[in-house]
């Protein structure tokens, strides 16, 4: 059921992308966009959290683009404020119709935080929010893996080694990570949403211990990221959604051999 819905929504997206790039077809784009939103609202209960977020962001971006055109200004009155890991709230507002869906969310403020700037430290990852790191190495103790969503914010020139995560079935949220190395290794039965927000100039390796690329790809969401290099060896097991590239405005990431060699860190 969900595959059929996703297929229809992706067809709408493809057609909208074509229409929005033609200056003479903005009105047609509005009509198609309204159809897209109606279909999304009617079928959103059948979608996973990942696809809900994907189409929510597409709606936000498309609304902004159409409202920039003087011929379409004030025609669109739809907003969408669905929230996901790292944010509060689970509300979708579509036109005058309000839809509410219960979604597992991650509220960083409820976790005990490690405050202050930590420099040149080796830090064992726990269930705490890590933030304000400079030149640090973060690692996981296999005998005491995290049990809650992993949140790391504001890190520069760091090595984030997120391996041996035990039975964690939650999410990884990294925000404002700069000039750093990131390694994430999942078990074959771990389905963790990985979200990167405002990452820049990072070398990234994301893999599964047992690779079955056609059966269990790893979902990675990028938002406001740039200059990210992923390991080419992991390309087949990743499904990357760049929210700033939905309309083919230019990729903010690439696949290379040995991505760590392109960025200087303390290691």
Image (tube, helix red, strand yellow):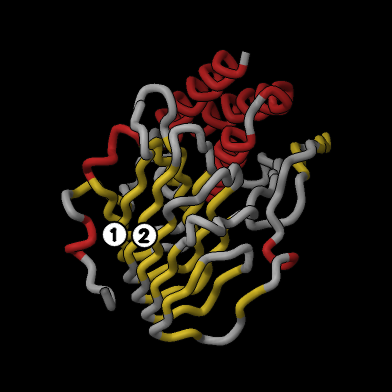
Distance in Å between CA atoms under marks 2 and 1: 6 Å
Mark 2, other Cα within 10 Å: few <14 / some 14–19 / many ≥20: many
- The C terminus lies in which quarter of the figure? bottom left
- Give how far across and how far down residue 26 sits, in percent: 50, 34
Instruction: Kindly indicate whether the residue at mark 1 contacts the one at mark 2 (C-beta within 8 angstroms).
Output: yes
Q: Secondary structure at mark 1?
A: strand
Q: Residue at x 36, y 68 (%)?
A: 159
State the image coordinates of residue 243 (x, y, percent, origin top left).
Answer: 47, 46
198 shown above or below 76: below
Label ID, residue 203? 1
Q: Is residue 112 above or below residue 87?
A: below
Quadrant in which the N terminus appears? top right
Q: What is the quadrant of residue 265 in the picture? A: bottom left
At a point 81% along the width and 38% down the height, the residue shown is 100
Residue 95: x percent and y percent? 76, 37
Q: Which residue is mark 2?
A: 182
Residue 67 in view here: no
Closer to the camera in the image, 16 or 234: 234
Of residues 106 and 63, the one nearer the viewer is: 106
Secondary structure category for the residue under label 2: strand
Disc number placed over residue 6 in the picture, else none: none
């Amino acid at each position: 059921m969900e595959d059929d819905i996703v297929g229809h929504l992706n067809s709408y997206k493809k057609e909208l992308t074509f229409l929005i790039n033609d200056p003479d077809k903005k009105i047609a784009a509005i009509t198609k966009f309204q159809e897209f939103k109606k279909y999304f609202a009617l079928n959103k209960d059948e979608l996973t959290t990942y696809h809900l977020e994907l189409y929510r962001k597409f709606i936000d971006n498309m609304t902004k683009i159409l409202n920039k055109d003087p011929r379409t200004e004030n025609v669109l009155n739809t907003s969408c404020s669905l929230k996901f890991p790292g944010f509060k709230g689970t509300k979708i507002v579509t036109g005058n119709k309000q839809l509410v869906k219960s979604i597992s969310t991650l509220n960083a403020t409820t976790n005990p935080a490690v405050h202050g700037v930590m420099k040149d430290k080796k830090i064992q990852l726990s269930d705490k929010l890590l933030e304000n790191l400079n030149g640090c190495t973060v690692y996981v103790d296999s005998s005491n893996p995290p049990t809650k969503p992993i949140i790391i914010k504001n890190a520069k020139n760091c090595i984030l080694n997120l391996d041996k995560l035990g039975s964690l079935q939650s999410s990884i949220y990294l925000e404002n990570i700069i000039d750093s190395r990131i390694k994430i290794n999942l078990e074959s039965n771990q389905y963790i949403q990985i979200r990167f927000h405002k990452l820049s100039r990072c070398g990234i390796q994301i893999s599964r211990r047992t690779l079955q690329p056609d059966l269990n790809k790893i979902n990675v969401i990028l938002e406001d990221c740039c200059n990210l290099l992923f390991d080419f060896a992991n390309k087949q097991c990743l499904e990357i959604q760049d929210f700033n590239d939905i309309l083919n405005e230019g990729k903010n990431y690439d696949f290379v051999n040995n991505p760590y060699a392109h960025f200087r860190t303390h290691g």
